[in-house]
Image (cartoon, helix red, strand yellow):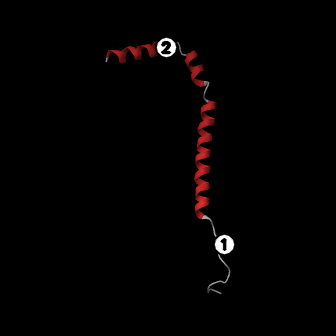
Amino acid sequence: MLGTSNKPQDPIYVIPMALALALAAFAGGGLGLLWDSVEHSGDDAVQAENSPDSAQSADTEAENSAKE
């Protein structure tokens, strides 16, 4: 009962499973980043329209960097 079995061992395909897991992780991460960027793509434009000093602060930063 505790000896060797005469049944052939089925391969468990560890390397293909690990590659599939890594591929799924990268694909899921990439799709998540894409989803997030599409979801928040209009937020910057709305924020810029609602902020009256956003153009002024950008001009001030450009002038300060030019002085240096």
Judged left or right of residue 3, residue 56 is left
Residue 66 sits in quarter: top left
**Measuring 62% from the left and 85% from the top, which residue is drawn there?**
4
User: Residue 44: x, y in percent?
Assistant: 57, 23
Q: Is residue 19 above or below residue 31?
A: below
**Measuring 60% from the left and 27% from the top, which residue is drawn there?**
41
Identify which amino acid the numbered label 1 is placed on: Asp
Tell me which numbered mark, 1 or 2, is placed earlier along the sequence. Answer: 1
Other-residue count near label 2 (Cα within 10 Å), few / some / many at <14 / 14–19 / ≥20: few
Other-residue count near label 1 (Cα within 10 Å), few / some / many at <14 / 14–19 / ≥20: few
Element class at badge 2: helix
Q: Are marks 1 and 2 in contact (CB under 8 Å)?
A: no
Which residue position is annotated with label 2? 55
Single out the residue that lies furthest toward the left. 68
Q: Nearer the viewer, residue 17 or 44?
A: 17
Which residue position is annotated with label 1? 10
Tell me the distance, in whole angstroms, between the alpha carbons under discs 1 and 2.
Answer: 67 Å
Judged left or right of residue 5, residue 47 is left
Residue 16 sits in quarter: bottom right
User: Residue 32: x, y in percent?
Assistant: 61, 40
Residue 17 sits in quarter: bottom right
Q: Is residue 37 above or below residue 24?
A: above
